Amino acid sequence: MNKRRRKPKLPNYPVRVTVESLTHDGRGVAHVDGKAVFIDGALPGEELSFLYTGRSRKHDEGRLCELFQASDQRVEPECAHFDICGGCSLQHQNPASQILSKQQTLLDSLERIGKVKPERILEALTGPVWGYRNKARLGVKYVRKKGRVLVGFREKRKPFLADIQRCEVLHPSVGTRLEELAQMIQGMEARERIAQIEVAVGEQATTLVLRNLDPLSGSDTRVLKDYAQQTGLHIWLQPGGPDTVAPLWPEASQLSYHLQDYDIEMQFLPTDFTQVNVAINSSMIRQALELLELDADSRVLDLFCGLGNFTLPLARRASHVTGVEGDAGLVQRARENAARNGIENVEYHSVDLTQDPAGQAWMQQRYNRILLDPPRSGAQEMMPHIAALGAERIVYVACHPGSLARDAGLLANEHGYRLVAAGVMDMFPHTAHVESMALFEKSHG
């Protein structure tokens, strides 16, 4: 009879260490008897003791117990819930040091994974570090033991919702209202059947999309409309899949943001992908266009173009822009955004960019500039096709340094491009997310 192997008991005493570095997810790294320990809440150079929270074959995990020598990077977290909420991992590190850590993560990834090194490092793009987050997905849970509803993010490294009253990185129109939202939902008959709230902030309105697992009663509908009218928040419902999203109040609910430098208004649905940080988005677009060195003869291919966040500014500076995106709904709204802004030198195609695009009509065109902004998984499948187009300059906007590093290695080591420049963008302050941009130029000779 096989006995199930029991997990070994964790030591229940504090262990003293010196922290050597940070992991890519923001934990301090120390070693005990030659084995790495990842410690929540620890910073490089600190003398501290920790308690074990987990063990595995390759590394152990722990949480800070007592601090004997603090790092000069350490600051007091702004949020009262930082210790439990998993939404942020770096509030105890000053913002300037966060950026340096993220830049090092990018450079380490490029060298280790891609075997490449940028010829120059771009200056980090920074902006507001509080109240910046315009998109978020909040969990909602009626906790029977507590007899109340929780609204927010999950606890650090746990599946449970954190018991928080506010969020300092969320846009204040929502971040200051988490407790109020929880109380409103608690007063609904469907309080156990609201699964999440998707937040989308535009310039004129903030929208909450409630995922209601059952149709709402008349009284619950009234509760939501009353709350919307009192707060000015727009409320939408999602009773099924993404195509069931519809406004509850007001009926004519619209979200938009402006790209002032290019005289462009972008309209979007609350469930559409948009950049979470308005200030960084503006700086990011400006930097991308500068790196591409556009002129009146530039023909640009914009891959993973979404709503046209890059496509339309590109079109203001270039001869012609082709946008390609896998989500047909986003492509439709991209076309509408182009028409609304009177931009005619663009064309859009709805194509799955994980599949071979060789037979596509847009692949037969000539481009001397390429911009791509792929999802976290990157654009590995597209690299040989991008290279075959022979564009002089390629700008790669990345939301995962590992994916960028892998794809940069392909462009530089297999397809004749130089990695001219790379740098980070602080799209998500106080989190371990590393957003970056890289410029490639075609090698000659």
Image (spheres, grey):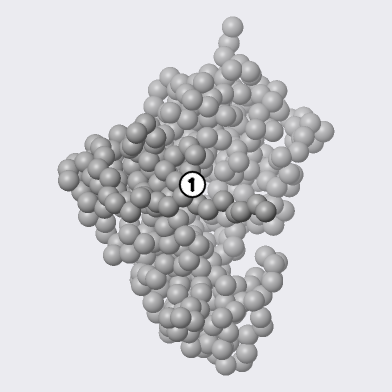
Q: Position of residue 153 (x, y in %)?
A: 45, 64
Tell me if I can see residue 427 in this picture: no
Q: Nearer the viewer, residue 99 or 31?
A: 31
As drawn, which residue projects farthest toward the front?
A: 1
Q: Say which residue appears at 37% left-offset and 65% top-offset.
A: 167
Q: Quadrant of residue 387?
A: top right
* Residue type at the position of mark 1: Tyr
Q: Quadrant of residue 372?
A: top right
Q: Nearer the viewer, residue 416 or 159?
A: 159
Tell me if I can see residue 186 in this picture: yes
Q: Say which residue appears at 50% left-offset and 52% top-offset.
A: 7
Q: Nearer the viewer, residue 292 or 129?
A: 129
Describe the element under mark 1 as helix, strand or loop: helix
Q: Position of residue 147 (x, y in %)?
A: 45, 84
Q: Nearer the viewer, residue 292 or 163?
A: 163
On screen, 135 above or below 313?
below
Q: Say which residue appears at 48% left-offset and 88% top-offset.
A: 187
Q: Which residue is mark 1?
A: 262
On screen, 441 above or below 22?
above
Classify mark 1: residues with Cα within 10 Å, few (<14), some (14-19) or many (20+).
some
